[in-house]
Image (tube, helix red, strand yellow):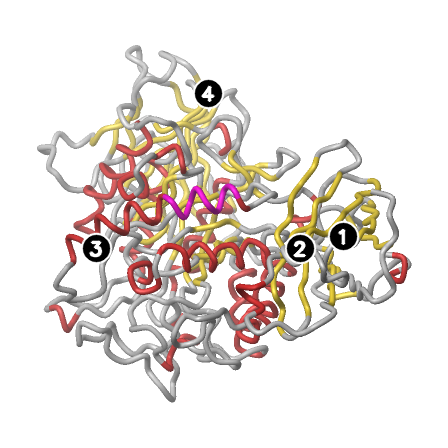
Amino acid sequence: MSKSILPTTTLILAIICGRGSSLVALGNEARGELSAQANVMVEITCTATRDYRDPFHDVTLDAVFQTPQGRMLKVPGFWAGGREWKVRYASPEVGTHRWRSACSVTADRGLHDRTGTVTVTPYRGENPLYCHGPVRVAADRRHFEHLDGTPFFWLGDTWWMGLCHRLHWPEEFQRLAADRKAKGFNVIQIVAGLYPDMPAFDPRGANEAGFPWQRDYSSIRPEYFNQADKRLKYLVDQGFVPCIVGAWGYHLPWMGADRIKQHWRYLVARYGALPVVWCAAGEGTMPFYGYKRASEDAVLQKQGWSEVIRSIRATDPFGRMITIHPSRSAREIVDDPALLDFDMHQTGHEPESAIGAMAAQIRGSYEARPVMPVIAGESSYDGLDMREWGGGVLSSAATRQMFWIGLMHNGAAGGTYGANGIWQLNRRDAAYGPSPHGRSWGSTPWDEAMLRRGSAQVGLAKRFFARYPWQHLEAKPDSVAWGDNQPIKDGPQPCALGTGTDLRIVYVPRPRSVVVKQLVPQTDYMASLFDPVTGVYSSLGQIKTKRDGTWQHLPPDHRHDWVLVLQRPAGQVPAGTRPSQPGQPIEVRSHRSERIRAASKWRILVKRVQP
């Protein structure tokens, strides 16, 4: 690995730093000596010595890296246009990393057998994706964490078509990102150019440089991905994990499995060094709308996407997490669930009446084997216009409740929000228009959809769980029941999470009383309430469970869903609240005043306090 590079090779280092800027290379590029901070991407550009008739197919470039600990990583390179090929690399290991290029055209000395070093130094910024490392599945197989073990609560947003021209770069893209960052989102689900809800090469799917492939699928188009780079790098700079969806499922029969694998090799080479998550496809087994061979294609797509996932794993040296977006459950649309790192779900776009069905779906996956995190990746888009289907417009309340139900049944691993108007990027001057089935999902522009209340309310849920050891929570569906003796129906039921008997978090989707069970009998707990609409906390003070280990509580005065927390040992209350004496008010930071009624003899006044 000590052979020096030839002077004809061009080497460039691009560092994506935590403050959102790209810096010039550090080190001596002429000798191939480059440096980067831990977990930050370094880019090596090699220049071929001649032109190629079909560079995408005629040339394959890899670089083998040896880490300071002696591991060998084969990193795929990608054609960047003209005579340029690039290799991107990142590592958490501090020290000197040595690399050597390997090209399928061994006679091209500009590409083959190049050598160099990358010196990785400790990261000095504030970006959590670099401070703590990329995201992976935690040891409990229920949650996510950063590479250094720091827990990661998945709060995703849906920007399926976020790489197209209808969300203008940079002003509009950065405006939407700023809004989502302020609300606590940390994952963006985004499709790499082969979009849903449109035929191939629909003008609505182009970006500033056109489409990702030539119209006959003869070659990838680096120009498209040069524009995509700006957006994806910016998301990472802002602390978002891009969950990159390779294509919508029905592109596989259009392109063929071999081209889809080439597409994915290109994505891995281009973006694998970023702290990303891979989603092999969207609605992997869904054929194109109205296609006559739908059942045949569904079988083909299940087999094909399973093979693509195997190919992604074989290609990716960084081991990024992999899932697939389904029509229902990711487990169901691959030939072996063990291919997946986590089970992504689509739970339907329905009003509040669908909550019970979603609970059963997520709970079923949570209990299935092999054990893996479960994420509702698509459910009840906020503001989805169903009027052309004979329905109404889905409310923020429905979206919020579905989000909470997902959290309560997946152990608080997280979930994904979606707003109608953003996923398809309606513009005020140009609505997306009809889908291939001829009907439209509505014309709400993206910048109006951005302000829907549901996006703030799912952020409140994330902040709520941050007050507790959420990464240790387990679903406890049998530890809570309605307390008003009304008949149990198939509709929404109260649900609970907990850590043994020390902590119980209860989500109540209706303004009804509940009985919390399986607590320590005749034991003191600190009780508090949380309003998932406003983010208001209030303490009920200390309560004592009954001899049978239960405790009952009436609903607050507000007429919507609510959250109850019981916690041991006595005296531990969430930050921002304090216990009060009966009849005395307590102060909680909030944006409104309201009274909350408790089943115990406490009377609590929640009043506004200026921050």
Which residue is outermost to the bottom? Answer: 429
* Residue of label 1: 113
Q: Nearer the viewer, mark 4 or mark 2?
A: 2
Identify the secondary structure beneath mark 3.
helix
Where 167 sits versus 500, above or below?
below
Identify the secondary structure beneath mark 4.
loop
Residue at (29, 79) in percent of width and height = 443
Whole-percent x, y for residue 285 in the image: 26, 52
Residue 502 — which label? 4
Counting labels gives 4
**Mark 2 Cα within 10 Å, few/some/many (few <14, many 20+)?**
some
* Residue of label 2: 103
Residue 297 — which label? 3
Residue 581 — which label? none
Residue at (61, 44) in percent of width and height = 134
Identify the secondary structure beneath mark 2.
strand
- Tell me whether circle 1 and circle 2 mark residues in contact (CB < 8 Å): yes
Query: Nearer the N terminus, badge 3 or badge 4?
Result: 3
Inter-mark Cα distance, 4 to 1: 60 Å
